[in-house]
Amino acid sequence: MDVNVSELLTSLQSSGFRDIAGSRASAQIPFSRSLVNRLVAQALRGTSTPVREVDVRPHDGDEFDVVLTLSWPFVPPLKMAVSVAQQPQFPASPVLVFRWSLLGAVGALASRVIASLDRLPAGIRLDGDRLLVDIPVTAGHGPAETLWPLVKKLELHTIDERVVLDVALEIPA
């Protein structure tokens, strides 16, 4: 039997998944540091932010370091400590909240950097020492868009050198 998975998924999406109503699925998906950094680089392409490069370094315990390289001359890379402050609650509040702080002696530069980050990609905003990520908005339009109403849980966790997504989907009966 020759089954085209892409055609099957397209058919299921177009029917609102009613042919598999009542289904539940959950998964823990680990992403390597290199894949995370490729995805971040892809998200930054085409934006007007002064951030030229981002290096995400996951650690155990929902914490990671982020090294920002800016396009400003004579500004050294900035290292930030980041932790998950609040997991999203689907579907009511699909916003992932991070708390961040700058590491090292960069004091005066911090306010200038923060002020320039008002040009973040859609769905991402800064609120003091918190970075809020509206997951459906940042994911944009595309195949995943039809899945958002089915998401019951989507959490981001970290272990050494990996980011782990904990996902649960449910198709109503």
Image (cartoon, rainbow, N blue to C red):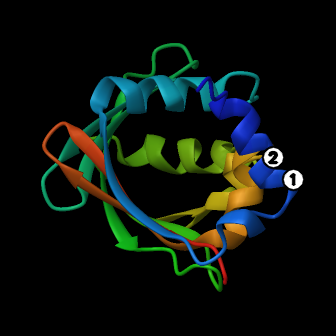
Q: Is residue 39 left or right of residue 83?
A: right
Taking the view exactly as shown, the residue that stands out farthest to the top is: 73
Direction right: furthest residue: 14
| Residue at point 36%, 58% (across, down) | 27
Q: Is residue 102 visible?
A: yes
38 w.r.t. 84: above or below: above
Taking the image as drawn, is residue 128 in sight? Answer: no
Q: Which mark is residue 127?
A: none
Q: Given the image, on which type of amino acid does mark 1 rest?
A: Ser
Residue picked out by circle 1: 14
Foreground pick, 61 / 90: 90
- Quadrant in the picture for the N terminus: top right
Where residue 97 appears, x then y in whole percent? Answer: 48, 69
Q: Position of residue 167 (x, y in %)?
A: 43, 63
Q: Residues within 10 Å of mark 1 (few under 14, many from 20)?
A: few
Residue at position x 65%, y 65% from top? 20
Q: Nearer the viewer, residue 49 or 168?
A: 168
Instruction: Name the amino acid type tagged 2.
Output: Ser
How many marks are shown on the rendered structure?
Answer: 2
Quadrant in the rendering for residue 68: top left
Label 2, residues with CA under 10 Å away: few <14, some 14-19, many ≥20: few
Q: Residue at x 63, y 29 (%)?
A: 3
At which x and y percent is residue 69?
45, 23
Identified at 18% across, 36% down, the residue is 161
**98 or 78, nearer to the observer:** 98
Find residue 171 and report its image quarter: bottom right
Q: Does dot 1 land on a helix, a strand or a loop?
A: helix
Q: How far is mark 2 from mark 1, CA to CA? A: 5 Å
Do the CB atoms of the residues marked 2 and 1 lie less than 8 Å apart? yes
Local secondary structure at mark 2: helix
Q: Which mark is residue 11?
A: 2
Between 74 and 167, which is closer to the camera in this rendering?
Answer: 167
